[in-house]
Image: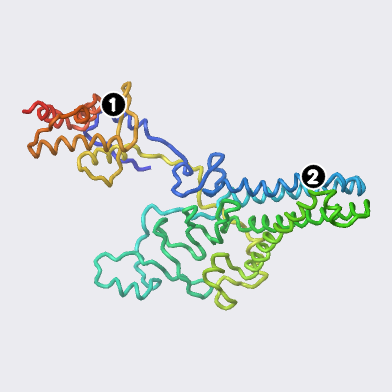
Amino acid sequence: MYETPLPAQLSDSNRRIIDTSATTLRVYQVWKGSNRFCLGGRLVFGPDVRSIFLTISLIVMPVILFCAFVSQRLIHEFDHHLGNLIVAILIIFTVYDLILLLLTSGRDPGIIPRNLHPPELEEDGSTMSTDWLGSQSGVGVPSLPPTKDVVVNGVIVKVKYCQTCMLYRPPRCSHCSICNNCVERFDHHCPWVGQCIGKRNYRFFFMFVSSTTILCLYVFALCWVNIKKIMDEYHCNVWRALLKSPVSGILILYTFVTAWFVGGLTVFHLYLIFTNQTTYENFRYRYDSKMNPYNRGCVRNIFEIFFSKIPKSKNNFRAKVKLDSSALFAASISLARTMSPEMPKTSFDIEMGKRQAVAAEDFEEIQSQIDSVGGLERCGTQPRHTNQGDKANWEMSPDIRMLAAEFGMEPSFNDRQKVRRGH
């Protein structure tokens, strides 16, 4: 890794301190998106990952109620082996559903790595918009075009330039404002799983939604079976049976409403799969059978979603990144000399013979004090110490004096003493 050379004016002790203070972090620790990471970057979630606990509770609590209050009657009514099998299937299917939820929420959905610098303007202008090329005539340094033309299955598709990620988004890619990432084959950001749905987790998302629908219908049917058994046993109507097993009635109502929601979502995504669309494309572009350049036929569309190989992640979140602290220190020295507020600020606190990095605002406050003294000297004014607060503003700690001596600013402090004494 290229390292910026240390300034010549630094002492050997400072060189050794800065060399040893170079920190090696991992990619997920310096990630610029809004993602949350667990297990050392092995699991990547969205910023709203807490919503996954609500989703888990909405799945697990009805199953617990069913096993605690409904399953016992079914086990006794049926043959014990059959009754136990009914409950075992429910538990196994619930675990399977939760695993799909974690696979959807805890993996990279297809994040495209950001560029460190904007891409170079292509010499071949054939892919650029004609209107944009005309608008750039006579301009000294042309800017990057907002869109480019890409051919997909013989159809020209415009791809946009992302100012945040500094790249031209591939076809079907979009920037998620919640996760602050560009995601391949972006479908939508799902608040129920706390993650973007993209190329690498859409399959698991659909399997999760469809399995949740089946789970709801399974509990719904078993609760009705329990009500029917109560009606046969006590020779009563439905309402009396519901009074004898109120949990069954609650679960019937709950699973009925939930099945409509997740079932409707399953049907909608089946339509998207058959026509090879994403939720984003369906709401934004309203493709028909002739306009959609990604539609390859129903069979091929299904094969692409369920039987194609999931691509590897383009991000190695556990890769090590070495931070060049010498470059940061050089930037701080340049800041002290140029007074530029736009450059990175770094300060050092001298304590027990060691310099430790502190907040950038501390260095700014020190510099403002130095600046104020220099300004008074240039203007030829003399400060009036009317109160203790003004006097405190002029008092410089030994740390500041040592820092100034390190940066070669000691004459400024001597001038400050002369100003205070009226010389």
Q: Are marks 2 and 1 in contact (CB under 8 Å)?
A: no
Classify residue 317 as left or right of residue 410.
right
Depth check, mark 2 against mark 1: the one in front is 2
Task: Look at label 2 and name its amino acid.
Answer: Cys
Say if 346 sits above or below 314 in the image. above
Classify residue 90 as left or right of residue 408.
right
Say if 330 sits above or below 309 in the image. above
Q: Earlier in the sequence, mark 2 or mark 1?
A: 1
Label ID, residue 13: 1
Residue drawn at point x = 77 percent, y = 55 percent: 252
The residue wearing badge 2 is 67
Rendered location of residue 133, percent (x, y)? 33, 73
Rendered location of residue 58, percent (x, y)? 68, 49
Residue drawn at point x = 34 percent, y = 35 percent: 359
Residue drawn at point x = 24 percent, y = 36 percent: 7
Quadrant location of the N terminus in the rendered image: top left
Q: Secondary structure at mark 1?
A: helix
Classify residue 199 as left or right of residue 408.
right
Classify residue 321 as left or right of residue 371.
right
Q: Judge by depth and name the residue closer to the eye, 105 or 143.
A: 105
Rendered location of residue 123, percent (x, y)? 34, 67
**Total labels drawn:** 2
Q: Judge by depth and name the residue closer to the eye, 286 or 169.
A: 286
Colour setup of the view: rainbow
